[in-house]
Amino acid sequence: MTEQNKMQSKPAEANKGASRGGKRGGFRNRSEQIPEEFEQRIIDIARVTRVMAGGKRMRFRACVAIGNKKGKAAIGLAKGADVTNAVTKAVNRAKKNIIEVPIVNDTIPHEIRQKYGAAEILFKPARKGRGIIAGGAVRIIIELSGIKNITSKILGTNNKVNNVKCAIEALKRLKKVEKNEKADQKIGEQK
């Protein structure tokens, strides 16, 4: 190959990778598509061991909560060889399971009681200025979801991971209260 032929083939090779992926953005990871507006908080880190033929194999389990404080929250649970690997994996898992939390006047629309395994949680809406009344890991989820006034009680186990999973299930089950203007007018006319 002569010097001139080499020069001509380089631009074609440079463009080869650029055309991959088409209109949809190429080979980006799903986690890159989610904007980085989410705040993350570590709920629990545990050293877990697995007994193998040669001895014990140690890994780290991380439970991480993410949220944007505007009605979106999630948790992720993952294991890794070291703490940073476990936390990174947990955050990526959480980003794939984001839930919408209905918020009405900085609180939840209605009371809810949720059971998940041995964990049981009670959430009650609270008036403005009351603040977040919640314990431990449940408080983190509520803060990250953007709820400012709520009363809650953990009724079951003390296990942080199960309590957080239970809280997420409860927030998933909340129903958005739709204002029915016609019904409000009828009630006003009857009085």
Image (cartoon, helix red, strand yellow):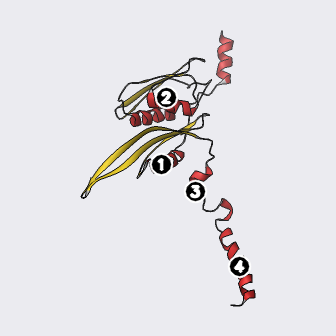
Which residue is pictured at 59% across the width and 34% down the height? Answer: 71
Mark 1 vs mark 4, foreground winner is 1
Residue beneath disc 1 = 84
Q: Which residue was labeled with disc 4?
A: 10
Label 2 and label 1: CA atoms lie apart by 24 Å
Looking at the image, which is closer to me, 131 or 113? 131
State the separation of the CA atoms marked 2 and 4. Answer: 58 Å
Which quadrant holds residue 5?
Answer: bottom right
Secondary structure beneath dot 2 equals: helix
Q: Amino acid at mark 2?
A: Arg
| Nearer-N-terminus badge (2/3) | 3
Residue beneath label 2, please? 139
In the picture, which quadrant includes the C terminus? top right
Q: Amino acid at mark 3?
A: Asn
Q: Is disc 3 in contact with disc 1, using a CB cutoff of under 8 Å?
A: no
Can you give x and y, in whole percent of width and height, for residue 154 in the image? 41, 25
Alpha carbon distance from label 3 to label 4: 28 Å
Q: What is the number of the mark on residue 29?
A: 3
Mark 2 / mark 4, whichever is N-terminal: 4
What is the three-letter code of the residue carrying label 1?
Answer: Thr
Question: Which of pointers 3 and 4 lies earlier in the amino acid sequence?
Answer: 4
- The answer to whether residue 117 is above or below residue 23 is above
> Cα distance, mark 3 to mark 1?
19 Å
